[in-house]
């Protein structure tokens, strides 16, 4: 593989790193932390931490119900957060942004509302072989009540989506296409615009799992024309337990509520209840107010930076790390699609991923090992799991060097 080109010197990664307090800590005998588990969750910039502290210190109140000052401030901040997230993803209106607990809940919401109200016995859902469990299990749960077939599109030898197989998977019974924008295990960037175009040509709606794309690529859901787009806050420098489901207005208007309770209603009597309009009809009960506001702070932090430069820097670190590991004896990369982002998955000869991860951890290097919630993909690859180094905009070539040096130690111990 060709040597990675030099990094863009105009990107000040040191300045970015200084905004993330967790990166400055040392672990195990004064060893500086190298954090390479960003596909699982990212660290948080001081701007997000400060915004959460300000909310709880000065604005904490419930939303949509109170007439007092704090409630009005909290309501304004919560709905401002919705507008910020709409701008972040290029949504046509804030009303198309539903706050959820994350990507998993977003996909479950679509399955249990859109799917349950529109799918019929005999319908098919087209998925890919690289799906995270969150885009498999919700559809299997729906299969308990509707006779659905899950059709799985295979991958090429390099881990890219086989577009010919995808085209052949579409049929008159296809009720939905659901796929990841970026694979959390392989790093493959899927051609979602082509998928949407091909599906829409046959009037098939498309759901995109954007959990791994939101922190790594600028998004424009309106231009993409996907029917649904889901992502999580904690993977894009925001809090845990908060995420977004974007849905086209016509879909959200037609979908029944997901859960019942306060704040999602219009009127209630013991005889009959009428429901609020989207998005509030999908946000029953007291929402995760603080973390929605924190998520907006994360989105604003990203929008305050040159997102193309952030992505270019990540791509440089990924290319550099890929080059270093591909030259090592005993290392086999898993997933070498032409279009990749942020994820470097690999296995070592004669070393179980868990053992490698444990040794790396003692050296201060945080990676993920195992199946990465993609057990069907691991079964297809014939692997018990992989070692996954996943990068964010604050990672550096020096981090990749530390990983390579850590692998020296792993291979010495198990060689």
Image (cartoon, rainbow, N blue to C red):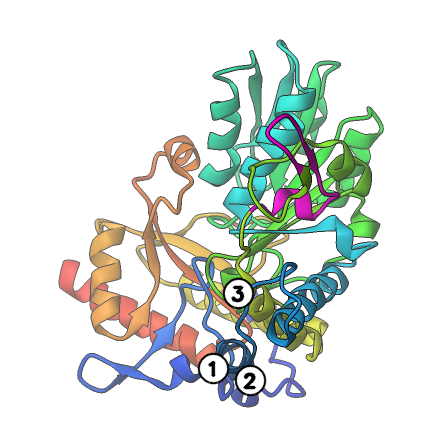
Numbered disc total? 3
The answer to whether the residues at label 2 and label 3 have Cβ atoms under 8 Å apart is no
On the question of residue 181 being in view, the answer is no
Give the mark toward the camera: 2 or 3.
3
**SS of the residue at dot 3?**
helix
Q: Which residues are magenta?
A: 268-284
Tell me what residue is drawn at x 53 percent, y 57 percent: 242
Could you tell which of marks 2 and 3 lies nearer the N-terminus?
Answer: 2
Can you give x and y, in whole percent of width and height, for residue 40 in the image?
Answer: 43, 58
2 vs 1, front mark: 1
Residue sitting at x 51%, y 85%:
19
| Residue in the image at 38% along x and 36% along y | 375
Residue 357 seen by the camera: yes
Instruction: Estimate how packed mark 1 is, as few (under 14), some (14 to 19) or many (20 or more) residues with alpha carbons within 10 Å.
Output: some
Instruction: Identify residue for label 1.
Output: 20
- Say if the magenta span includes residue 278: yes
Using the image as rendered, state which of residue 56 and residue 306 is in the foreground: 56
Q: Where does label 2 land, which residue?
A: 16
């Amino acid at each position: 593989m060709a040597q990675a080109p030099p990094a863009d010197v105009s990107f000040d990664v040191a300045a970015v790193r200084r905004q993330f307090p967790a990166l400055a800590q040392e672990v195990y005998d004064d060893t500086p932390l190298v954090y390479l588990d960003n596909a699982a969750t990212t660290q948080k910039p001081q701007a997000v931490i400060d915004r959460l502290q300000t909310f709880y210190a000065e604005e904490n109140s419930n939303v949509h119900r109170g007439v007092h000052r704090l409630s009005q401030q909290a309501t304004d901040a919560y709905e401002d957060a919705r507008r910020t997230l709409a701008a972040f993803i290029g949504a046509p209106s804030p009303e198309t942004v539903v706050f959820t607990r994350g990507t998993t809940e977003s996909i479950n919401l679509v399955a249990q509302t859109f799917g349950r109200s529109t799918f019929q016995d005999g319908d098919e859902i087209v998925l890919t072989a690289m799906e995270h469990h969150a885009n498999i299990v919700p559809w299997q749960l729906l299969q308990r009540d509707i006779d659905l077939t899950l059709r799985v599109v295979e991958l090429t030898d390099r881990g890219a989506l086989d577009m010919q197989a995808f085209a052949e998977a579409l049929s008159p019974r296809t009720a939905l296409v659901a796929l990841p924008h970026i694979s959390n295990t392989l790093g493959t960037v899927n051609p979602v615009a082509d998928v949407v175009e091909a599906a829409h040509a046959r009037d098939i709606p498309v759901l995109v799992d954007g959990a791994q794309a939101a922190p790594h690529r600028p998004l424009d859901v309106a231009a993409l024309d996907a029917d649904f787009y889901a992502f999580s806050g904690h993977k894009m420098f925001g809090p845990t337990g908060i995420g977004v489901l974007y849905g086209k207005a016509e879909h959200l208007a037609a979908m029944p509520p997901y859960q019942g309770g306060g704040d999602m209603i219009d009127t209630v009597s013991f005889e009959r209840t009428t429901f609020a309009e989207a998005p509030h009809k999908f946000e029953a009960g007291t929402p995760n107010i603080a973390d929605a506001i924190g998520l907006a702070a994360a989105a604003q932090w990203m929008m305050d930076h040159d997102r193309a430069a952030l992505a270019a820097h990540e791509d440089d670190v990924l290319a550099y790390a890929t080059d270093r590991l591909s030259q090592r004896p005993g290392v086999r990369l898993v997933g070498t699609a032409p279009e990749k982002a942020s994820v470097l998955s690999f296995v070592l000869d004669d070393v179980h991923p868990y053992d490698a991860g444990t040794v790396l951890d003692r050296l201060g290097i945080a990676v993920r090992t195992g199946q990465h919630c993609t057990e069907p993909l691991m079964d297809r690859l014939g692997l018990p799991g992989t070692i996954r180094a996943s990068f964010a905009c604050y990672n550096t070539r020096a981090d990749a060097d530390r990983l390579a040096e850590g692998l020296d130690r792993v291979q010495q111990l198990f060689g």
